[in-house]
Amino acid sequence: MNTSDSDDDSYNERTALVTSENPVVPSYRPDPDLTPPNDTASKRPRVTRRSGPAAADGGGSDQEVDADEEELTLKYGAKHVIMLFIPVTLCMVVVVATIKSVSFYTEKTDQQLIYTPFTENTTSVGRRLLNSVLNTIIMISVIVVMTIFLVVLYKYRCYKFIHGWLILSSLMLLFWFSFMYLGEVFKTYNLAVDYPTVGVIIWNFGAVGMICIHWKGPLQLQQAYLILISALMALVFIKYLPEWSAWVILGAISIYDLVAVLSPKGPLRMLVETAQERNEPIFPALIYSSAMMWTVGMASPIDAERSGQETDEEAEQSSRGAESESRPSRSFPEEELEEDRGVKLGLGDFIFYSVLVGKAAATGGDWNTTLACFVAILIGLCLTLLLLAIFKKALPALPISITFGLVFYFSTDFLVQPFMDNLAAHQFYI
Amino acid sequence: VYFIFFPGGFAFLPFLWLVNVVWFFREAFIKPAYTEQLQIKTYVKRSAVGLLLWVAVLTTWISIFQHFRAEWGAVGDYLSFTIPLGIP
């Protein structure tokens, strides 16, 4: 594929956008100060309510409340870990399956993104290292610039511009990349498909995707689409980033992530805080939300509209404070209203996790390496979510997982692999 | 939402109709009746009909194409997106 300039710009803006959002793992919503303290009688002992009883209790049974809080926090946390495991696993599975079967994505090509102009075909090791570091610097600076641009736009309320940008980039992802992907898959399996059929398929996939992500749609479909486009993006990265640059970029991005989210002047932190101040959801096209919301046994007639609205609401995460107040009054005609405010993970996180695992699958030894990286990333995700439960603010989701992943990849590739080969060669089972 | 998905499906989007059917199936048929339900039911039914129509058309077209592709010569190649290599 000839990566034209406009393609690069759009999709790297998408990348930049996506990566700029990647560390956003906001704390459980809503903010504790928004929850009304009168929800103690509700049937939903959710974590966010705990601040209610805590506030109401005053000084009395602080210890019990604390213990309860702890328990709820951890239980809550465990559920969300599972809810995030599944999409991350799915994304990685899709990427690895594609890498292993469709050879297009692992073919050596001299085409590179314009963001990584230095080639890695040089003879000496030192030169290659230097080139990859330079590539990384360029890439990271592009991402930083894009992020700051996005945050500035957001601060000055240029919503239309941002929306247009997002729509453009998701359009490109949904149509152009999936077209290429489908073509490659068909070529691999030697199927003949005609243009009309392909046209219908791609048109359907893309159009429903746009509607689902940017407007309304069933939550699971939206999640599925987000996973798919993350996988597509990751595949593009795997194909077009030269070897060593990819690893250095992964490392550099996790450091940048750490800095951008945690430091007080970091652009991502400002983005999250501004969004929280204004009580607005962060753009739906950049964040994966695992929240589910369903009502059981609705009896009142106005619930028909609400069921359409609810998925919209929880998908867009509109001001939760107002919702939670209205919920108790609505729960009388309903038998049970179960609502779970999920955790949100930025799409860039998905992408870079998948890039790591995909690269491991493409260039690493065999399944050992891939599996090791996969496990490492999941462990990192667990830890990050644990920290999230403890700190309750937006945390970068990349650093821990990527560090583990990198460590595991290199150690498995260079230490465990020869070990296992030797063992197998000598038929020595441990 | 369902009343927007339905006309949307006319733009060559049977997938949208499928989403309509699957998503609102429970609302339309399984839940106990309420006033809006009749409207949902009609839309879901119509989407299902449209979907079946499209599935039929696509299946026939694909079977025709796959079967006669080699015989059609140049026209078959022109229509093809990917051409299988090797000996059938």
Image (cartoon, coloured by chain):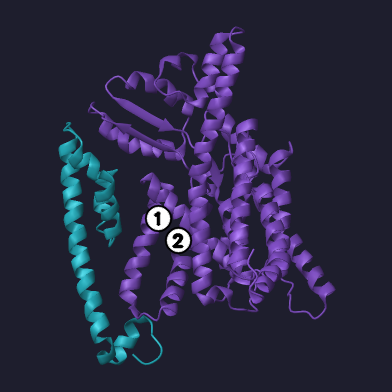
- Tell me the purple chain: A
In front here: B5 or A92? A92
Give the number of the disc on residue A113.
none
Label 2 sits on residue: A174
Q: Amino acid at mark 2?
A: Leu
Instruction: Name the quadrant of the N terminus of chain A.
Output: bottom right
Q: Report, in whole angstroms, how far the alpha carbon at label 1 lies from the one at label 2.
A: 7 Å
User: At which x and y percent is residue B56?
Assistant: 18, 67
Choose top left, top right, bottom left or bottom right for residue A121.
Answer: bottom right
Q: Which chain is cyan?
A: B
Q: Is residue A58 above or below residue A307?
A: above
Question: Of label 1 and label 2, which has the lower sequence position?
Answer: 2
Q: Position of residue A205 (x, y in %)?
A: 37, 61
Is the C-beta separation of discs 1 and 2 under 8 Å? Answer: yes
In the rendered structure, the residue with mark 2 lies on which chain? A
Q: Regarding mark 2 in the picture, which secondary structure is present there?
A: helix
Which residue position is annotated with label 1? Answer: A209
Q: Nearer the viewer, residue A273 or B86?
A: B86
- Is B42 left or right of A70, judged from the image as shown? left
Q: Does A275 sit left or right of A216 as displayed?
A: right
Q: Residue at x 66, y 39 (%)?
A: A269
Quarter of the view holding residue A106: bottom right
Is A219 positioned to the left or the right of A139 in the image? left
Q: Within 10 angstroms of label 2, few (less than 14), some, or many (20 or more) residues?
A: many
Residue at position x 50%, y 57% in the image: A91
Question: Which of the two residues, A24 or A117, is positioned nearer the viewer here?
Answer: A24
Q: Is residue A261 above or below residue A123?
A: above
- In the rendered image, residue A48, in percent from the top left (x then y), is placed at 51, 25
Observer able to see residue B37: yes
Q: Residue at the spot x=29%, y=43% of the render?
A: B1
B52 relative position to A322: left or right? left
Pinpoint residue A159: horizontal percent, then vertical percent.
Answer: 53, 43
